[in-house]
């Protein structure tokens, strides 16, 4: 039985001289693996549609192991992303997270839409680091490690928030911050942005400009929280760190 779905190429592996194993993240079926026979041949009809970070429509057979790809119609190659190492690094991390976390044949249309909208925004020239911040914050509930950013995690106070406790799992007010000597200090702007990133609609993301200090604070919170609870240790994340330190 042939299946048709829109999807994004999130991983590829060369197989032999002419074939390519492709991992697609699809709207209808979630993550699937397919064999694209002959895709490495220059004139193959599967070549363009099976390149890493390509969005398109795909026709395939599903199997217990690898399925077979019969048709690939590329619709967007995300050329702006691929033309610059910085957005390419962030985009690679975005899909790497999905590749590691998603179970085969388990679809999540909302998560698929998040990934697609972020890649479209990134390809449109929006700040890749900010988009990744939003992605990481919104992904926390799906990972089962949601952080409290709307009110003090200790007393419930919604204002005068001035730090983030990795140990307690959320923001702290100016009175409760003394309960965690390792709390990460935050400005009121950083707290508001964390809250906004949690609730923002991906379809309505506009240009967001952050000061260097604010970026550093949000990055510290996200990195520390992910390191403590996500269980992820991705080369793509470490590569971003290397680029940022250049």
Image (tube, rainbow, N blue to C red):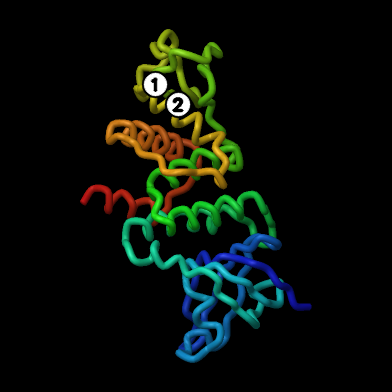
| SS label for mark 2 | helix
In this view, the residue in front, 178 or 74, is: 74
Residue 103 in picture, x, y percent from top left: 64, 57
Rendered view: 210 above or below 179:
below
To which quarter of the image does residue 184 belong? top left
Q: Quadrant of residue 46?
A: bottom right
Q: Residue at x 47, y 22 (%)?
A: 171
For image coordinates 47% across by 47% down, the residue present is 232
Q: Which residue is mark 1?
A: 188
Quarter in which the N terminus is drawn: bottom right
Say the numbered circle drawn on residue 192: 2
Q: Is residue 219 above or below residue 61?
A: above
Please say if the residues under marks 1 and 2 sit with CB atoms less than 8 Å apart.
yes
The image position of residue 59, as x and y in percent, is 67, 77
The image shows residue 146 at horizontal and vertical percentages of 56, 33
Q: Which mark is residue 149?
A: none
């Amino acid at each position: 039985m042939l299946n048709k779905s829109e999807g994004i190429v999130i991983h590829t592996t060369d197989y032999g001289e002419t074939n390519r194993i492709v991992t697609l993240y699809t709207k209808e079926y979630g993550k699937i693996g397919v064999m694209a026979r002959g895709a490495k041949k220059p004139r193959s009809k599967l070549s363009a549609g099976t390149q890493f970070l390509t969005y398109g429509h795909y026709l395939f057979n599903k199997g217990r192991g690898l399925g077979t790809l019969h048709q690939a119609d590329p619709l967007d190659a995300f050329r702006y992303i691929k033309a610059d190492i910085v957005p390419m690094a962030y985009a690679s991390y975005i899909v790497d997270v999905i590749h590691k976390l998603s179970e085969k044949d388990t679809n999540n249309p909302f998560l698929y839409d998040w990934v697609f909208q972020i890649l479209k925004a990134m390809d449109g020239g929006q700040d890749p680091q900010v988009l990744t911040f939003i992605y990481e914050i919104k992904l926390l509930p799906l990972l089962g490690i949601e952080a409290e950013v709307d009110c003090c995690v200790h007393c419930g106070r919604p204002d005068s928030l001035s730090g983030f406790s990795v140990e307690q799992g959320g923001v702290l007010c100016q009175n409760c911050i003394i309960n965690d000597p390792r709390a990460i200090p935050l400005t009121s702007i950083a707290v508001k942005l964390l809250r906004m990133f949690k609730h923002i609609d991906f379809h309505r993301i506009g240009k967001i400009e952050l000061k260097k200090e604010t970026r550093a604070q949000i990055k510290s919170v996200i990195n520390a929280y992910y390191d403590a609870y996500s269980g992820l240790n991705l080369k793509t994340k470490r590569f971003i760190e290397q680029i940022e330190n250049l």
